[in-house]
Image (spheres, rainbow, N blue to C red):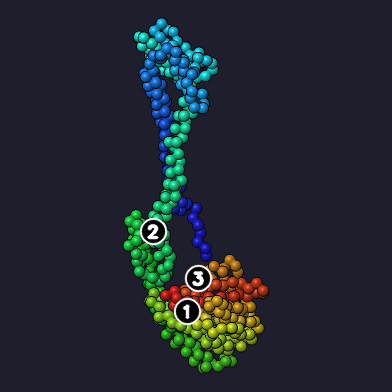
Amino acid sequence: MKPVKPNVPSLRRTLRISLLVLLTSFGLISAVASYFIAGMEADEFFDNQLRQIALYIWDAPDGYRPDNIVAPSHDLEDDFLIQVWDKNGGLLVSSNTAIPMPRGVATGYANAVVAGIDWRVYTQVEPARTVQVAQQMEEREETAAQASLNAIIPIALLIPLSWLVLNWIVDRIIGRLDRVAVDIAARDAESTAPIPTVAAPVEILPLITAMNDLVLRLQAALHQQRRFVADAAHELRTPLTAISLQVGNLMAAIGAEGKYAQRIADLQAGSARASALVGQLLRLARVESGAASPEKQSVALLPLVIESLERFAPLAEHRSIDLGLDQNADAVVEGVEDEIRVLVDNLLDNAIRYTPDGGTVDVILRARESVPTLEVRDTGPGIPDASLTRVFERFYRASSADIDGSGLGLAIAKAAADRNHVRLTLTNRTDRSGLSATLVFRSADSAKRVA
């Protein structure tokens, strides 16, 4: 079953978005503030420039005319308008007589509109003269805007660069959480070792400690449950065996044609089913035991499958079921031989049990690209699609109750497959009715490479 993605956004995404929004907001605020501050500083600079020019303007010598000065080619709008009056109000000098700028009456700054053009004017009134310097507002604003833009360009460049650095920092921080998650995901379901806390961030240490405590409690509960099942099955086996013997003796004493022969036969069949169930419970407890698995070794799969087929051949022959083997390789897999045998036996038993008389059960052994696969294919009724995800549960039976079974066979097979790193899948056949159980093993060579 695929994991369901939660609706809550990931911590990585939330952290990135929050920091990006915060960083961008700070950048925009800084850029706007820098723009206005640079504009104000430019205005102050230009005003001071007007004042400095006015202070250092002296009386012009006789015959001086500014329009006689040869200057390099430039935009005339960039020029300052400089005017000097004598103490009687006579205009001594004007850098541009075409502009009728009126004379100021007091020292200081002022704004004026002349011929539809806005000017910034500084007037220096002295006893012997009046000096006035003016500059077009449009030129001041353009220069101030350019200075402001130059001030925010570094900020604009730093914002995307900081995004990259921020993403790298977030990946570094969240990567430590990812490493903890990968370590947990790689752990075996039966592992009781605590989750290591060496590389874990301090902020999640309480979570890891709580998870370690939970794993220990869960393992203790599972061990207690399995021990109970094993003890109960073991204790039941002896009395059930005695009951079977007594029923057999009673049947021998009464005879097959006796008055109560049918009832005794039913009792004998019920006793046999109970004994089989106890045997299945013991097998399940042994496969799911909390004890460490025996050391895995190289197992030749073909001889093991042939042995299983030989054991089930009489049962298949009794019900006229065609039991066959199709193989193209003698694959060698890595695992515990007894548990793999239990796995194959349970799949064969399940296939024969649910295949009607006269049906077919095929065992197909393949080794494609060094990956051994074993498929047990029957012509039974299959499993309803809604039940495919539940058939590995204990005592769950998807088929009709008139077929003899305990509901433990697939649970045992699944437990044995998990312990030996075998992928077990069940699918309904598409060519006809029936079920296909597929085992994908790890070859002995690939297991050595993984180790």
Task: List the residue tagged with mark 1.
Answer: 445
Which of labels 3 and 2 is toward the front? 2
Determine if residue 278 is in view.
no
Task: List the residue tagged with mark 3.
Answer: 393
The answer to which of 163 and 421 lies nearer the viewer is 163
- State the quadrant of the C terminus: bottom left
Write the residue at 52% across / 81% down: 344
**Element type at mark 1:** helix
Contact (CB < 8 A) between labels 2 and 1? no
- Name above or below for residue 319 compared with residue 179: below
- Name above or below for residue 58 compared with residue 440: above
User: Which residue lies most toward the front here?
Assistant: 63
The answer to which of 112 and 83 lies nearer the viewer is 83
Tell me which amino acid carries mark 3: Glu
Characterize the local packing of mark 3: few (<14), some (14-19) or many (20 or more) Cα atoms within 10 angstroms.
some
Looking at the image, tell me whether mark 3 or mark 2 is earlier in sequence order. 2
Q: Tell me the tag on residue 29.
A: none
Looking at the image, tell me whether mark 1 or mark 3 is earlier in sequence order. 3
User: Position of 361 compared to 341: left or right?
Assistant: right
**Disc 2 to disc 1, C-alpha distance:** 33 Å
Write the residue at 38% across / 11% down: 129
The answer to which of 62 and 296 lies nearer the viewer is 62
Expressed as whole percent of the image width and height from the top left, the position of residue 219 reads 38, 69
Residue 361 sits in quarter:
bottom right
- Name above or below for residue 66 compared with residue 35: above
Q: Tell me the tag on residue 176.
A: 2
